Amino acid sequence: MKNKKIMLSKIIVSIVALIFLSFFISSKKENKILNNIIKEINSEDINVKNDAIEKLELLAKKGNSIAMYRYSEILIDSDRMEEAIHNLELLFEAGDEKATILLGITYLENTEKKLKGFHLLNTLAEKGSSTSQLYLGVCFTEEECPLPKNEYLAFYWLTLAEKNGESDANFLLKITKTKNEKINREVQKEETQKVICEINPSSQSCSP
């Protein structure tokens, strides 16, 4: 159990780390500015840190996608969820996969938006996002995760995540108890529907 909790935290951290890959497609000037801001945000000097956050906020308001993502993380840590979700939804509408994953995870913590969060993550996983596959694989076995526990879906998504290069999935598959030895798309659909109905029994696709 402890190992799974650590793994769930690692996955969230890895999602955050993906943002740095975007630096390579930014202009050199923006790249340098953002790098400096990120360093200052991690400063132990509270004045330097606060000043860096203000700079990041300004870049986010100007529409810089990297700044919007990073500032959303700060908003989430500060429990300013509505503002964070607003930024992430804008990035989601622009097709930003990293932001969509974080938005889905954030939605899961909101009872009214939990199903929407699951749909976002499940859709990305079905499209081949190894990060979403790994997150769902862990989430379906972890008590701390807001999704209903589901042994088959944990096995299904961890198996695909491993095939897509997520090395952590291999370790988790070894400690995940399941009688299933092969993944089956039809079974995945059936189990996904069960999860949807557990999250929201009044959903149109669920029997009365």
Image (cartoon, rainbow, N blue to C red):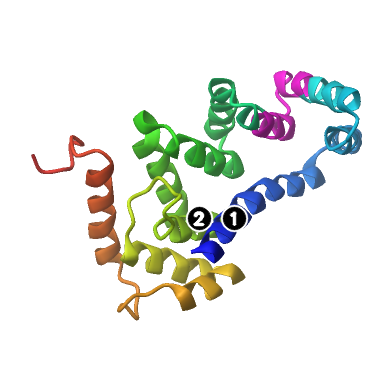
- Residues packed near mark 1 inside 10 Å, few (<14), some (14 to 19) or many (20 plus): some
Marks 1,2: beta carbons within 8 A: yes
- The location of residue 204, given as percent across then percent down, is 18, 36
Q: At 32% from the left edge and 60% from the top edge, which residue is drawn? A: 150
Q: Position of residue 142 (x, y in %)?
A: 44, 57
As drawn, 139 above or below 96: below
Residue at position x 85%, y 28% from top?
49
Q: Is residue 70 magenta?
A: yes
Q: Residue furthest left?
A: 208
Residue 152 located left or right of residue 11: left
Quadrant showing the C terminus: top left
Q: Is residue 187 left or right of residue 174?
A: left
Q: How many marks?
A: 2
Q: Which residues are magenta?
A: 57-74
Instruction: From this view, report whether residue 184 is shown above or below residue 132.
Output: below
- Where does residue 177 sit, x and y in percent of width and height? 37, 75
Residue 102's spot in the image, x, y percent?
Answer: 56, 41
Residue in front for this viewpoint, 23 or 75: 75
Whether residue 176 is visible: yes
- Which residue corresponds to the image point at 42% horizontal and 32% vertical from the top-left? 110
Q: Label 2: which residue?
A: 135
C-alpha separation, residue under disc 1 versus residue under disc 2? 6 Å
Q: Main secondary structure of the magenta part?
A: helix
Mark 2: amino acid: Tyr
Callout 2 secondary element: helix
Q: Nearer the viewer, residue 106 or 66?
A: 106
**What element does badge 1 sit on?**
helix
Earlier residue among tags 1 and 2: 1
The circle on residue 185 is none
Q: Does residue 165 appear anywhere in the picture?
A: no
The residue carrying mark 1 is 11
